[in-house]
Amino acid sequence: MSESEATPMSLFSRQSNCFDTPHAKNDILHKKTKHFKEIFSVSDDQLREITEKFVEVLRDGLQHEDRTVPMLPTFVFGWPTGKEKGDYLALDLGGTNLRVCIVKLMGDGKFEITQSKVRLSDEQKREDGSKLFDFCAKCVKEFVEKHFSKEQLKEPLSLGFTFSYPVVQKAIDHGELIRWTKGFGNANTEGHDCAAMLSESLKRHNVPVKLSSIINDTTGTLIASNYVEPTTKIACIFGTGCNAAYMDHISEIPKINHLKLPDDEDMAINCEYGAFDSYDHKYMRAVRTKYDDYIDQHSNKPGEQAYEKLTAGLYLGEIFRLVLCDLVDEGVLFLGQQTYKIEKPFSFDTAFLSLIETDPTEELLTVMGLFKYFFGLETEIEERQFFRDLSCAIGTRSARLSACGISAIVKKMGYLHEGCTVGCDGSLYSKYPHFADRLHDAIVAVLGPDGKKIRTRQAEDGSGAGSAVIAAMTKARKEAGKYKHV
């Protein structure tokens, strides 16, 4: 819904002192609360059905190229020893920020990081791909010149590139972008080798580094978390987008048989399962709402990333906003007030919902202040209670659906009996209230009592430490002469 489509301003206005603002009656809000709790609920049976389909989709992606959930081989072989050491430079292009860091691996699962971070603008997420990578190169150059002496730069530094988007890899230092996600849409990059594009930008700006690897942030999170906590077998990202990585046997990846790698070797798989149920929505149709369909249809990638659009942090605030816009149109909320500010797409972010859910005051004064400060809207306690219930319903659905991907990997790999740790990163997991507990409860609902053996924990720094550990592992592998062709 655009500003041009906004509901005309009511005759009543907070700018006038002649009238009290009309508010929705309690019984109407009670009915609306019940309605939205129902449409955003996902039953245990639905979770189990979705998980079974998820397992099938994961297996299919390992067997065949060009699947919607691509199950991408990463050419990261096996688990770290925990004894990796050395200093490594890392560049992380994520969904929100660009980060450059030096990682000092000290062995025994320990590391230190020095970093610099800049927030990416919406313009940078839309400009030509070469300009985006030129910006990356400039940031690396500034960081290197600040933290390294000329003496240290006589030989090119090794750079690990963490690229949080689905790429097809033919080797550890090659990555062809399949599609942008997380709201990015830079031209002239999809179908191109982004590792090569970055290398060209580094060369163009005379940056004294050599790209050694390109990895996904989720793969980095898997390796970094295992480096610190060896029981970690799965890593997930619950942030702007969603994804998972795990270690599978090469014998289970038929689509890379032509590489003649040993069947008894293991390789990390970047699932890119935010694309689950894309296009035809045949697996999650029963839990989709008209708000999900609206977001999908008005996104820069209609039909794509269906699972992500129901679960990821980028979209929860927008779902909340669309519900509010509906109720404004129905004459239920904000009667007599100017609501043009909430007509702007993505004007509610997920942090806003977090604050609503965690308001500790009986009168929900934090919620009152948020709506007044950001949108110039007055609210009554009954409305604020509705906002909290709505936030809870949307956040709970996200966490419960997020459990399906984890549960599918657990079932596929047979981890249920012995249990395992899942390293979880991203703002939803670390900052959204009750997300971790809701996620765990849903895993148990899907997998049964043994699901309690699947433990989630805050992941280690995948894009920094993970990149460094992978660089160390790759260096050791190549020095040993193993699989030099990849």
Image (spheres, helix red, strand yellow):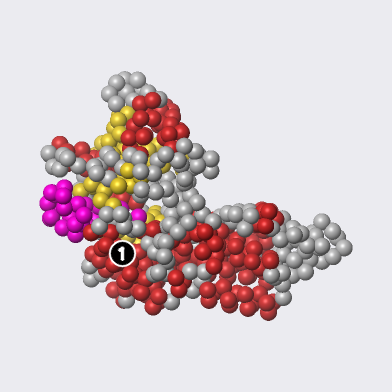
Query: Quarter-wise, where is residue 190 in the image?
Result: top left
**Is 256 one of the magenta-colored residues?**
yes
Give the answer, above or below, for where 260 lies relative to 478. Answer: below
Residue at the (35%, 20%) spot, across then down: 150
Q: Is residue 377 visible?
A: no
Query: Quarter-wise, where is residue 244 in the image?
Result: bottom left
Image: magenta residue range: 247-272
Query: Quarter-wise, where is residue 410 in the image?
Result: bottom left
Residue type at tag 1: Val
Identify which residue, 309 or 304, lies in the foreground.
Answer: 304
Q: Where does the N terminus fall, quadrant-wise?
A: bottom right
Residue to which mark 1 is pinned = 57
**Is 137 one of the magenta-colored residues?**
no
In terms of secondary structure, where does tag 1 sit?
helix
Give the answer, above or below, for where 159 lies relative to 429. Answer: above
> Residue 121 in the image: x percent, y percent?
53, 41
Q: Where does the C terminus fall, quadrant-wise?
A: top left
Identify which residue, 398 or 329, lies in the foreground.
Answer: 329
Horizontal side, residue 132 vs residue 408: left or right: right
Residue at the (68%, 71%) spot, across then down: 382
Number of marks drawn: 1
Residue at the (29%, 67%) spot, across then down: 55
Identify which residue, 160 or 183, lies in the foreground.
Answer: 183
